[in-house]
Image (cartoon, rainbow, N blue to C red):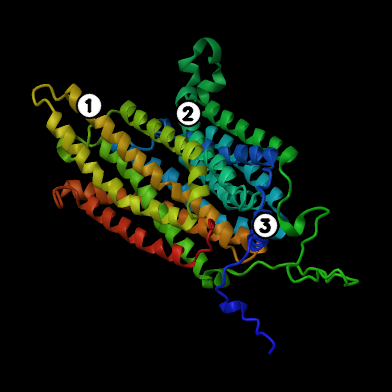
């Protein structure tokens, strides 16, 4: 009889030659796995540096007016009641945010049609001009026109995000995105310092800057310096920033994934250019709609915290606040900027290399309820350390208070990591390369929409809670915690629908 070859059920012991064959096979498989592992793509350092300079322009021009905007409104003699100055200052900032909201998606669509470079350069040039207009304004109408135009031109932020997505890939984005993310915290530190130092320069530095022009226009110099940053961004961008829109790259053709790669084929089928999806089709993509909705919640919660934190610090201790001076509030915001920069520089890259982006996003969103929950604890520390006779805080109470502030700001900036992760998720989940700009535009639109009305809502809620002592003056806290939990819930849809960035 012929023996049957039953290797599948063979359990006999093999001789000494078999392990050699198996070892060779295992070694071959290991080598194949190593060969399949993608190598990290080198970062285009010049392009990334130019892009970061371009990104710095918006936070510098946006925040440089914070230190002097109330004084500016007072100099315009709009009202005799100092308590109403805040209304006009808020009006100026809302004009910027609403205009940005109206233009952000249109810039993204335009960039998908004509390319990224012209849209970015046009936006920066417009922002430089409108910032100068703001410094030369002499009436509320001219101030509002300058800020509205500035908001329209700053709507190209989604386009800048798209460029970052197009010059990186999954092998190097964990290095590029944290570096790019440094631009906002650095710009938000430079801007206020610039505005505070160079407003009214003729009176502050009469020996050097005592010119009549600077006396007539006391807020021109910080605007001029901010515009200079914008011009530098244009110059560097023109030299180093290449076009990244796939359909507009000079001398480069798209490769279709369906093109024939058979070595026996005589011709290769030409790649058909991809077309961007419409808004309705983008919203029908589950992950894009989830990113847009969660981006709205993230922006509303984050903006609300920024507003309410300043109000909380400024309010009297007996009203539930901390009774901080303007300089103490400034120190707190500086600490926040430093923490944000440290997270981007030291931790963000490790997180992106180690954990899936969707999981990082959901974790960050889960921190928001606790950032609000810690605030009344700070008030309890202040109440416990308050000397009733002098009205001053004891040394121990001050120390504990600043430790608590550092902790809550650490939580906040850790939660704000979600902004940067959202960019990565949008890039990785865009339906196609042609729709990347519009996908970024849609997500940024929802964020800007939330930012346009969040300050009004949360400040009114805060004032109403204190005025009528609703829930002991903490109704605003209960509502914001509830909204934060809602935001945490909406973020779970991202984890359910997103592609994995790790593993």
Label pair 1/2, CB-CB below 8 angstroms: no
Inter-mark Cα distance, 1 to 3 = 57 Å
Image location (x, y in percent) of residue 335: 38, 31
Judge by depth and name the residue closer to the eye, 500 or 93. Answer: 500
> Which mark's residue is nearer the viewer, 2 or 3?
3
Query: Given the current orientation, which residue lies at the most extreme bottom position?
Result: 1
Above or below, 179 against 295 in this view is above
Drawn side of residue 237 relative to residue 441, left or right: right
Determine the image quadrant of residue 221. top right
Q: Which residue is mark 2?
A: 195
Q: Is residue 81 visible?
A: no
Which residue is drawn at the image coordinates 36% and 30% (left, top)? 330
> Which corner quadrant of the image does residue 279 belong to?
bottom right
Q: Residue at x 28, y 53 (%)?
A: 480
Read off the residue under disc 1: 398
Dot 2, how many residues are within 10 Å of its Cα: few (below 14), some (14-19), or many (20+)? many
Which quarter of the picture shows residue 331? top left
> Which label's residue is closer to the chain start, 2 or 3?
3
Q: Position of residue 170 (x, y in %)?
A: 61, 53
Q: Which residue is mark 3?
A: 36
Considering only order in the chain, which callout, 3 or 1, is on the residue closer to the N terminus? 3
x%, y% of residue 159? 62, 52
Outermost residue, right direction? 266
Find numbered disc 1 in the image and state the secondary structure of the residue it sits on.
Answer: helix
In the rendered image, residue 83, in percent from the top left (x then y), is placed at 28, 37
Q: Tell me whether the residue at label 1 lies in contact with that at label 3, contact meaning CB atoms closer than 8 angstroms.
A: no
Instruction: Tell me which residue sits at (88%, 72%) in the image.
Output: 264
Mark 2 → mark 3, Cα distance in angstroms:
53 Å
């Amino acid at each position: 009889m012929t023996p049957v070859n039953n290797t599948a059920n063979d359990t006999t012991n093999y001789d000494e030659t078999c392990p050699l064959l198996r070892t060779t096979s295992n070694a071959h498989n290991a080598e194949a796995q190593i060969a399949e592992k993608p190598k990290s793509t080198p970062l285009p350092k010049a392009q990334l540096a130019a892009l970061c300079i371009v990104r710095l322009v918006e936070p510098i021009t946006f925040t440089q007016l914070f230190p002097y905007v109330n004084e500016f409104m007072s100099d315009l003699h709009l009202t005799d009641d100092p308590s109403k100055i805040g209304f006009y200052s808020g009006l100026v900032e809302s004009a910027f945010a609403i205009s940005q909201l109206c233009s952000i998606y249109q810039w993204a669509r335009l960039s998908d049609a004509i390319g990224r470079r012209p849209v970015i350069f046009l936006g920066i040039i417009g922002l430089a001009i409108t910032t100068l207009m703001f410094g030369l304004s002499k009436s509320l109408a001219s101030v509002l026109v300058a800020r509205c135009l500035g908001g329209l031109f700053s709507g190209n932020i989604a386009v800048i995000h798209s460029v970052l997505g197009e010059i990186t890939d999954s092998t190097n984005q964990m290095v590029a995105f944290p570096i790019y993310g440094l631009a906002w915290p650095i710009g938000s530190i430079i801007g206020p310092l610039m505005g505070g130092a160079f407003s009214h320069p003729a009176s502050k530095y009469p020996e050097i800057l005592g010119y009549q022009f600077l006396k007539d226009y006391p807020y021109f110099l910080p605007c001029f310096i901010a515009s200079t940053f914008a011009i530098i961004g244009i110059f560097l961008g023109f030299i180093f920033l290449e076009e990244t829109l796939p359909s507009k790259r000079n001398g480069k053709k798209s490769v279709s994934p369906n093109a024939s790669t058979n070595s026996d084929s005589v011709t290769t089928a030409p790649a058909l250019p991809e077309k961007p999806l419409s808004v309705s089709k983008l919203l029908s993509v589950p992950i894009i709609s989830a990113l847009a909705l969660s981006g709205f919640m993230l922006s509303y919660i984050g903006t609300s915290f920024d507003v309410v934190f300043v109000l909380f610090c400024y309010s009297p201790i007996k009203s539930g606040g901390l009774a901080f001076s303007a300089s103490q509030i400034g120190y707190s915001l500086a600490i926040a900027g430093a923490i944000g920069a440290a997270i981007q520089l030291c931790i963000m890259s490790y997180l992106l290399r180690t954990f899936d982006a969707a999981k990082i996003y959901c974790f960050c969103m889960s921190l928001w309820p606790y950032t609000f929950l810690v605030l009344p604890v700070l008030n309890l520390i202040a109440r416990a350390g308050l000397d009733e006779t002098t009205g001053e805080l004891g040394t121990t109470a001050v120390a504990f208070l600043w430790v608590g502030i550092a902790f809550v700001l650490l939580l906040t900036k850790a939660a704000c990591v979600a902004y940067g992760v959202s960019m990565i998720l949008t890039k990785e989940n865009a339906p196609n390369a042609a729709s990347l700009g519009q996908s970024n535009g849609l997500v940024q639109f929802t964020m800007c929409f939330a930012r346009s009305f969040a300050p009004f809502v949360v400040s009114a809620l805060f004032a109403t809670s204190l005025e009528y002592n609703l829930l002991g003056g903490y109704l605003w806290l209960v509502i914001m915690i509830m909204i934060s939990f809602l935001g945490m819930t909406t973020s779970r849809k991202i984890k359910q629908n997103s592609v994995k960035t790790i593993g």
